[in-house]
Amino acid sequence: MLSEVVEALVFPGFLFTLGLGFLFEWIERKIGAHMQGRIGPLVTGPHGILQPIADFLKLLYKEEIVPTFGDVTIYKIGPVLYFLAPILGMLFVPVMGTRAVATFDLDVLFVIFLLAFSALMVVILSFASESSYTIVASGRLVLQYVSYEIPLVIAVITAAVFSGALSLAGVVQTQSNVWNVVYMPFSFIVYIVALMAELEKPPFDIPSAKTEIVAGWLTEFSGRSLAFLKLTKEVSLIFGGGLAVALFLGGPLGPVPADPLLASVAYTVYFLAKLLAVGLLIFILRTAMARLMIAQVADLFWKILTPLALAQLAFVILLRGV
Amino acid sequence: MTDNETKAEAGAGLIQYSTENVVPFGPVHPALKEPEYFKLYLRGEKIVDVIPRIGYVHRGLEKAAEQRRWSQNTYLFERTCGICSFIHSLCYVQAVEGLTPYEVPRRALYIRLIVAELERIHSHLLWVGLLGHWAGFDTLFMWVWRDREIVLDLVEAIAGNRVHKSLVTITGVKKDIPEGMKSRIVERIKYLADRARFYKHIVDTESTLLARTRKVGNLKAETAQRLCAVGPLIRSTGIPRDVRADDPYAAYGEVPLDVVTRSEGDVHSLLQLRLDEIVASVKAIDYALEHMPGGPIRLKIPPAIPAGEYATHCEAPRGEIFYFARSSGGVSPDRVKVRTPTMANLPTAIELLKGLTMADVPVVLTAIDPCFGCMDRMSFVNLDSQKQWTWSGEELRQYGIRKYFPERKI
């Protein structure tokens, strides 16, 4: 019982996820900076590695301005719920072995629900703050959501269908010899692109396009709420990336020593290495592209990625049938 | 923008957009580096109407000029614009030189051309970077702005300052380009030409940038002419209108110059056109440095300028600028009038925006390379009766007295 509480709260649960979130934000900023010929964060900690934490703490101290118009209750509760979704989701992602902290037979469905819940929370938060910018952003969020959600779910389901299991632990276990990405490369591509849309990374940073609608749905948030909303974006990357690792890259599996403790360490290292690979892929893609327009996003997902995901699903079903 | 104002306008019968979302674009907005207000009427993402409100950075430069000496005004008009500062002082000086009987030394004319073209490279690079930023392509922005440092360093080496060059003076320039500096300038600008070709390759091949710029804001040649567009904007529609070639000033008559045109009239063609113009400018500078004549760089003249009126124009990086100067024979001008390219291009940008989407606003609005600080003047539009009028100098003076000294009799 105690060990499970520690697992859920410290490692590989809450604190571990937060730490990874801060670390990946630093990696993202460093990579972006170096690709653009800049230096990036440098002052706080060695090579500026503590800068994301410093930024978070700074925002916590800042004054929070609550708009008098709009729905203040949702405006205040929303960030907490939004923050909980990826933290909760991370408990279902196997890190130290094939078993995650929390697991049940149909947890793939629950994870899909959490992904949808995050998107819904953003729309609600955006509406609740009710300024002209956030209303435009809400429209964009909903359009973007209906664009990427279906290919994203199809990609996740493809992995589940191939493994014949609706639990992440089951999906991971079937990849002990060959990773899923070998059989379903297009699902992996679709998943990564849809994940970038979910995380609003360029070229999909349309709902928070700063040169068009100020900060998009984040415009009216300040202080603590803003700190947690920004942190949630980073943690969502860990959750989404961890899910990609579990579904397509064999989770934490790899050659491990016999000793159970050393094996857990090795599993964690494999997981982190694969997560880093997914993160690097996303960071490099985001730095190399301009922002699309919302109609072009719908075009991309509906005309190209959804058929691609469906074709991959059909291929996988045939493969399993044979 | 309050709801009441919107309703008042709708009630006046001029604007009937009850279902539209009114989104303010400015006066303080991340996409605008200078304050200017555009009221966007949106239906969903689509722009139904745009109402600009100009004048946030009206600084009274023209009035200030009347209280300073002719030579002091060179520095004043340099501050009309923070980017194309040299061309403003050059155009002002040309207007003053038109009133005087002196002949400007030829070497000074060549130096003016070289610095004006360096400034064009600097301004175009700045714009390409900013367009990248506005289209959400920050990497392009960072790369281009790093290369822009090269040209700023060159300008600093020649003039002593990076932005406000303070180089040009009435009947000449103040600093010479020494023989030893030529090879360095040529080497650096050749590198810049290579970079410009590289960026052209990027804007022609990067698919997300193409998606944002190609076929966005299709400007027709007739529309551009009807709305009096100038500079790269009208050249992007295929009309080779360029003051440097049409009415050469400085040493432009003696230096071969490629007038770059495109036919598409969209934002992508503006990108290509400006990058091509960088290459053309590099060629012109190279030629001018090689063929620069010797001799003095300035004359000594008395401070009083003969009475008369003179109007002149120059091709700034953004388009044609126009200066008018009137002298009554004193040491200060009677009147100086400035017309900047942003003023000429703004109606075109507004026309282009209608029917596009919110996401196009920063890209299209900035495609004209707006410089609102240069533009702001006095003019009025009554939205109720759609009447437009401008104030004469005398009316403006009387308004000022009424406003600040209400007790005084006019």
Image: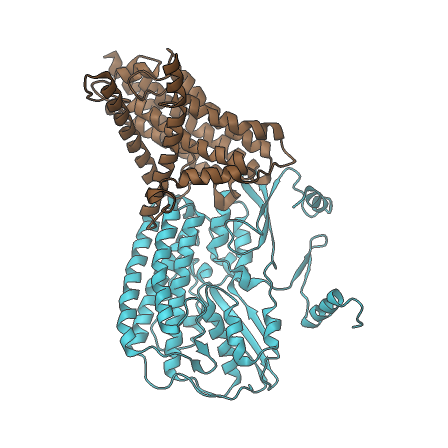
Chain colours: A brown, B cyan
In the picture, measured across the screen, residue B339 lies left or right of residue B213, that is right
Residue A302 visible: no
Q: Quadrant of the N terminus of chain A?
A: top left
Q: Position of residue A287 (x, y in %)?
A: 35, 43
In the picture, measured across the screen, residue B371 lies left or right of residue A268, that is right
Residue A74 visible: yes
Residue sitting at 46 percent across and 51 percent down? B218
Q: Give A121 or B340, whichever is nearer the viewer.
A: A121
Q: Quadrant of residue B103?
A: bottom left
Q: Give B5 or A31, whichever is nearer the viewer.
A: A31
Residue sitting at 57 percent across and 40 percent down? A63
Q: Residue furthest front?
A: A2
Q: Position of residue B348 (x, y in %)?
A: 53, 56
Q: Is residue A32 above or below residue A7?
A: below
Q: Give B243 or A68, whichever is nearer the viewer.
A: A68
Q: Quadrant of residue B180?
A: bottom left
Q: Is residue B87 above or below residue A274?
A: below
Q: Quadrant of the C terminus of chain A?
A: top left
Q: Quadrant of residue B129?
A: bottom left
* Number of numbered callouts drawn: 0
Q: Position of residue A202 (x, y in %)?
A: 40, 39
Q: Position of residue B140 (x, y in %)?
A: 36, 50
Residue sitting at 42 percent across and 42 percent down? A291
In the picture, measured across the screen, residue A188 lies left or right of residue B28, that is left
Q: Is residue B138 above or below residue A295?
A: below
